[in-house]
Structures are given as structure tokens and as C-alpha cells.
Image (tube, rainbow, N blue to C red):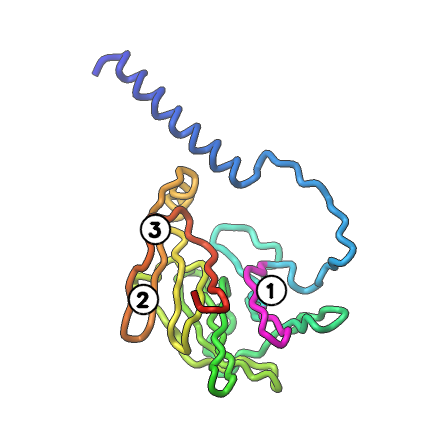
Amino acid sequence: MGTMLKLTLLGVTLGFLGERIYQFTDKAGYFNKVQPIDLPNCHLVKGIEYGSEDIHVLPNGLAFISSGLKYPAVKSFAPDTPGEILLVDLNDDVLHPEPLQLREYADASSFNPHGLSVHIDETDGTVYLFVVNHPLPEFKSFIEIFKFDEKQKTLLYLKTVEHPLMHSVNDIVAVGPESLYATNDHSFESSSMKLAERAIGFKLTNVVYYSPGDVREVASGIHNANGIAISNDKK
């Protein structure tokens, strides 16, 4: 291969990578300056500063918050703080998050919650909490299903859901007591390839539907599929 051709290919490759890196840093807001804004009706809620990833608010004003999320090879500012689900009553003038006890859950020490969702049984009002869990150190993806006891302030463990199609779950939306939609935010397993996938902008992630008798991909060709939600009319 001639020298000129090699230099041309090198220039094209560097140009492509440079453009991808610029797009990634621009979308991430790397060069933006954050301006402080005074919001008189907003207050710092203490106790949720470390790894609080998701929130779901019930019709009565109670809110579940997933807290303590940690990633492998990423520094945690609270390495000894366990992963937990916090309950906050948004009806209170001063918000006090309190951890919910996980009843009959085998290994709370490895609990590493990410996205979460709620399904409310329309017949009896039972609240089912679905939690994306990445137990350390493997950081694999599981969905833990709990039943919420409002009086006792506990979460009763019911079952764990896992499937090869749900390999890098970020968020979920529950549509039944054992049914859900899940987003996979990466296609590759290695940390270096995950970074390249996000930086280059590959559209390789997807959305998966899961129920005990039916698991399938329902959307694909997405770059970094992340949060997912459902409207009140279930659409």
C-alpha cells in the first residue's frame, strides 16, 4: 500500500473519530458552564446524594427512590453505603427519606439498584415494585420484584427475573404483576467497548418486552436506550 494511500486512510480515520468524540462531548455538556439558578421552592433532600438513579411516585404522594448505585472500576463517593430503596412522603413539608427493609431477600449486601417501576393491581390495590439490580462485583442485570407494605414500610421479595435478552438493563416500566418493558443501554459487555459504543454513537441498543411466557425485542436501532415510561392511558 502506497504512502499516500496510508496517509489518506489515517486522515479519514482520525477525522471520523474526532467528529464522533466532539459529538459525544457536546451532547454530554462537557464544554458547557453550569449557571447557578435560585429556585425558592426547591430544597436539598439529604440522604439521597449518592447513586440515586430513579424515582417513582405513587398516586398518594409516596415516592420510591433507588439509591446507592455503584459501577465497577468507577470511584464511588460512598463505597460503604449499601444499595437501598428509599421511601419519601412528598406530602410532608420537610422531606425525610427512609430506607425500606427488604424482607426475605437473600443478599441485601450486594443489592445495587438502578431503574425502577411500579405496578398497582387494580382489583385490590397491591403495589408491586420492580427494581433493576446489578449485584456487585459481576454487575449483571436482574429484575427484582417486591410487594410493598405501606403500614410496615417494608418490601417483601417475591421473585427475580433474568433473561439473555435483558443483558444490560438500565430502566424498566411494569405493565403487569410479572410483565415489563426493559431498555438495554449497551450492546457490548466489556467496559472499553461500552465506552466506544457510546462515544462513536453506534445505534445498537434496544427495548425488550418480558412476561413469563413471552420475551421478545420490540424496538431496536437505538443509541444508548435509557429511560422508559408509560402514560396514564397505558400507551
Label 1 packing within 10 angstroms: few (<14), some (14-19), many (20+): some
Where's residue 224, x and y in %? 42, 49
Question: Is 38 left or right of 187, judged from the image as shown?
Answer: right
Give how far apart the Cα atoms at labels 2 and 3 are: 15 Å
Q: Start and end of the magenta stretch?
A: 51-64
Q: Say what secondary structure mark 2 lies in.
A: loop
Residue picked out by circle 1: 81
Tell which residue pokes out farthest to the front in this image.
233
Where's residue 149, x and y in %? 56, 84
Label 3 packing within 10 angstroms: few (<14), some (14-19), many (20+): some
Question: Is 189 left or right of 34, judged from the image as shown?
Answer: left
- 221, above or below 84, in the image: above
Give how far apart the Cα atoms at labels 2 and 1 are: 29 Å
Residue picked out by circle 2: 163
Q: Is residue 111 visible?
A: no
Residue picked out by circle 3: 187
Q: Say what secondary structure mark 3 lies in.
A: loop
Q: In which quarter of the image is residue 164?
A: bottom left
- 63, above or below 227, in the image: below
Which residue is drawn at the image coordinates 47% and 75% (left, top)?
119
Which residue is drawn at the image coordinates 57% and 65% (left, top)?
55
Question: Is 38 left or right of 179, judged from the image as shown?
Answer: right
Which mark lies nearer to you, 1 or 3? 3
Q: Is residue 165 visible?
A: yes
